[in-house]
Amino acid sequence: MTATVAVRVSEVTEEAADIRSLRLVTTDGSPLGPYEAGAHVDVVGPTGVLRQYSLCSPPDDAGSLLIAVKREQASRGGSAALHEVRVGDTLAIGAPRNLLALADDADHHLLVAGGIGVTPLLSMAYELHRRGADFTLHYFARSREEAAFADLLEHRADFRDRVHLHFGVPRADQPAVLRAHAGGLTAASRVYTCGPDGFMDQVAGTLGPTVGADRVHVEHFVAAEIDTSADQAFVVELDTGEEFEVPADRSILSVLDENGIEVFKSCEEGVCGSCVSGVLEGVPDHRDSCLSAANRAAGDQMALCVSRARTARLTIELY
């Protein structure tokens, strides 16, 4: 992880059941933004655990950043600790990074959120409204009590007419709801979705045939399950000419790190995109949850922390 910035919690709001937002400001009063809509940051909490959280404030607000934290039942010290912080407490954050950037060439932007997945899409809604772009936001949650920012989305006068809230809709019925509101989508439209993996798969399966699979953009919160039983060793070569063998039970990132090669890293689970690097030769075996379908198909980038090689050698370029 690169250098962090000390921030102070200036405001804590209980947004929904087990979901709270934290407004963060610098300890010295310097600006934090603007940032690119859809971005996330590394957050180091009181227990020293590092996690990634999407930014959900207006991207052009340079005075503060807003994150929303859902208390996970199986928390290993990350979300649970952030549910104990109070106004005035100090945290550390990294620089904003974005894997869910808005496209500039869309005739319509459709934002589809599930549960806590509304967080990055909220910042995108702010930005699309600022641009005067054509967009709609659909938010699915189990109930209103479990929906983060429901009051804001219902009452924000400047774009509430673009927001559709769907509470208590069973997963099996959600495709029909989406199809009923997707009549205006074309091959020039873009879809952005964030939420549980099964939810996002369903959104992509429902709307992908209309806009194209490469125009459905997803944001993952958790790492994918990976079967490593058939993994084999391979050789990775840097564009500088240095070569290293990557054993079957090691990652490219860990081997490079062991040999003193500096690579930007954060989650080390294929979620945050920190260690994504270029592929110059060879075929990567993509196992990440951060690259888009188009990026994977191009084969010119890979996440070094989890992805491997389909060929005996890979030549890579560190970003």
Image (cartoon, helix red, strand yellow):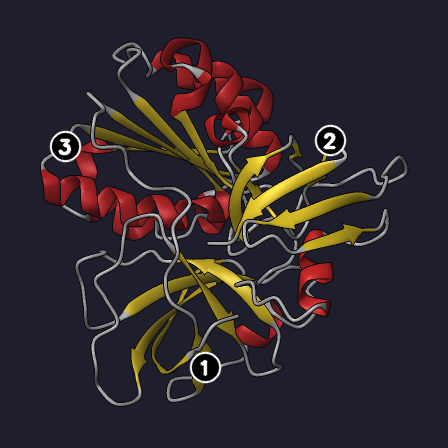
| SS assignment at label 1 | strand
Q: Amino acid at mark 2?
A: Thr
Residue 72 appears in which quarter of the rendering?
Answer: bottom right
Alpha-carbon neighbours of circle 1 within 10 Å: few (<14), some, or many (≥20)?
many
The earlier-in-sequence mark between 1 and 2 is 1
Q: Which residue is mark 3?
A: 133
Q: Are marks 1 and 2 in contact (CB under 8 Å)?
A: no
Q: Which residue is mark 2?
A: 311
Q: Is residue 10 left or right of residue 307?
A: left
| SS assignment at label 3 | loop
Question: Mark on residue 39?
Answer: none
Alpha-carbon neighbours of circle 3 within 10 Å: few (<14), some, or many (≥20)?
some
The earlier-in-sequence mark between 1 and 3 is 1
Q: Which residue is mark 1?
A: 91
Q: Are marks 1 and 3 in contact (CB under 8 Å)?
A: no
Q: Amino acid at mark 3?
A: Ala
Residue 68 appears in which quarter of the rendering?
Answer: bottom left
Q: Amino acid at mark 1?
A: Leu
Q: Position of residue 73 (x, y in %)?
A: 69, 60
Q: Nearer the viewer, residue 117 or 214?
A: 214
